[in-house]
Image: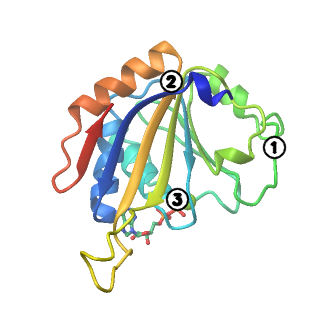
Amino acid sequence: MTSASKRHILDIVTCSPEQTYMLGKEASRFVYGGLCIMLNGDLGSGKTTFVKGLVCGLDGDEAKSPSFNLVNEYAGRINVAHADLYRLKVTDGYDLGLYDYLNYGYLLIVEWCDRWICPPSSDVWCLSFGLFDVDVEEDFLPDLGNKRKITFTCLGDKACKSLAMYAESIDVEGAKKCLY
Ligand code: ADP
Ligand code: MG
């Protein structure tokens, strides 16, 4: 994936798991079959929390971390395949059928997507999760525990249009957003 062609749409800071969950739930109104949502960020940065909200918004079963079986499927308004590549060093995606899911019209969600060596180059949302950079002067003993900064980029016209519409509509109480 060429980072040059990625479009930066939105940064958002959430202050609780509930806010990240709601962010995912709101995203469910803008995703479509054939879209790939790629999630990056350290363990505990909130990727699965976002996915749980998203899958709930699609009326799917309760999402669980697929780190043991690598891919979970959920039936809902849109069929979802939820992969977690944490236990793999790298994958070309074919062994797990990741492209098949997209071709069959699933919404494909991939945690630890940097391990996928040749991901799609359009119909992609990329979400990068990180700990919020707390100002030490402002907070003598900074508690990094509950703030997460999520950066949203996209690849391809359709994905960027839907991500921009989602970004405009986000209204999660307590979360701070910055549109680009
Ligand atoms: P990941 O899938 O990135 O490993 P999870 O979503 O499984 O992360 O876990 C995130 C953890 O961080 C949970 O224990 C959650 O309660 C906690 N947490 C604290 N603040 C937040 C936040 N703002 N957003 C998401 N999770 C948060
Ligand atoms: Mg996870």
Residue at position x 77%, y 37% from top?
A: 93
Please state the horizontal and vertical placement of residue 89, each as a whole percent of the image: 81, 55
Q: Where is residue 76 in the image (x, y as percent from the top left)?
A: 43, 36
**Rendered image quadrant of residue 160:** top left
Q: Which of marks 2 and 3 is nearer the N terminus?
A: 2
Whether tag 3 and tag 1 are in contact, CB under 8 A, the answer is: no
- Disc number for residue 91: 1
Query: Label 3 belongs to which residue?
Result: 64
Residue at horizontal 77%, vertical 41%?
96
- For image coordinates 58% across by 22% down, the residue present is 5
**Helix, strand or loop at disc 1?**
loop
Instruction: State if disc 1 and disc 2 touch (CB < 8 Å).
Output: no
What is the spatial separation of the Cα atoms under label 2 and label 3, in whole angstroms? 20 Å
- The amino acid beneath tag 2 is Gly
**Cα distance, mark 3 to mark 1?**
21 Å
Compared with residue 55, is residue 20 higher up or lower down, i.e. above or below? below
User: Residue 33 bears which disc, if any?
Assistant: 2
